[in-house]
Image: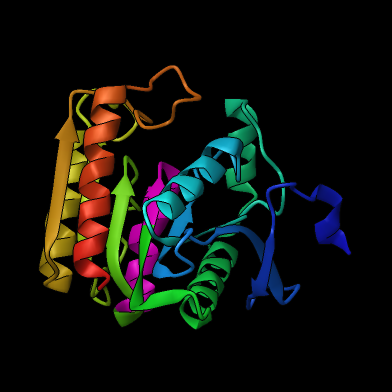
Amino acid sequence: MSHEQHANPRQNVTFESASESGHAHGYLRVPASGSGPGVIVVQEWWGLTDHVAGVVDRFASEGFVALAPDLYGGRTTHDAEEAQRFLAELPPERAARDLAGAVTHLLARPETTSATVGAVGFCMGGAFVLTLAAQQGERIGAAVPWYGIPGPTTDFSGLRAAVLGHFGEEDASVPLDAVRETERRVREQSGAEVDFRTYPAPHAFYNDERPNHRPEAAELAWSRTTAFLREHLR
């Protein structure tokens, strides 16, 4: 099958998707306790890298059942030009179908204790998180975008999740004016609780594999994220 051409060693779960193949893959971790609230982790444009797998592992260590869908079908890169190409080759509809399949899979797993799931995404994944929450409505209880926002015509009226966002004040690729405008539109269109936080940091400040990593901002945003997910995914 074509999906095996780029098999990613981090893939350890297969779930149903409305995509052409009828299925998608991802990386899943269950906490040591054996159960917990469900969280979808949406990758950056680099793919399902060791860093993304590490985020899943960290959520599991915090007591969450975490699943990162592999939106690139096994491909990863550390080259920005190649990442740009991978993103350009990812039809938004297919990403949406795979993410929706991941939500369905996580909610159906016996280890998942929450009636809704959280969605946490970084960069490209941050934009997908808000779009996913708008598409999935009541099934997403908490949405946490990190330094990523969707396009200005995105319709947020279907969003029912509480939203916590993390953005860098020195981020040249996601201007704060656009961040504030997105925050306003999400709040006005959905009526949801929306809290976008900013940090004295550049883009991708959580990613410890990249030069922009800022440990202090990263840890503050992480602690806020886990507390927020626990509050809204009971």
Q: Is residue 57 magenta?
A: no
Query: In the image, 228: left or right of 1?
Result: left
Q: Position of residue 134 (x, y in %)?
A: 32, 71
Q: Residue at x 89, y 64 (%)?
A: 1
Q: Position of residue 189 (x, y in %)?
A: 16, 70
Quarter-of-image position of residue 177 = top left
Q: Is residue 130 magenta?
A: yes
Query: In the image, 61: left or right of 90?
Result: left
Pick whichever, 107 or 35, lies toward us: 35
Q: Which residues are magenta?
A: 120-137
Q: Residue at x 64, y 43 (%)?
A: 86
The answer to whether one can see residue 180 in this image is: no
Q: Quadrant of the C terminus?
A: bottom left
Q: Position of residue 110 (x, y in %)?
A: 51, 81
Query: In the image, 4: left or right of 138?
Result: right
Q: Residue at x 49, y 74 (%)?
A: 111
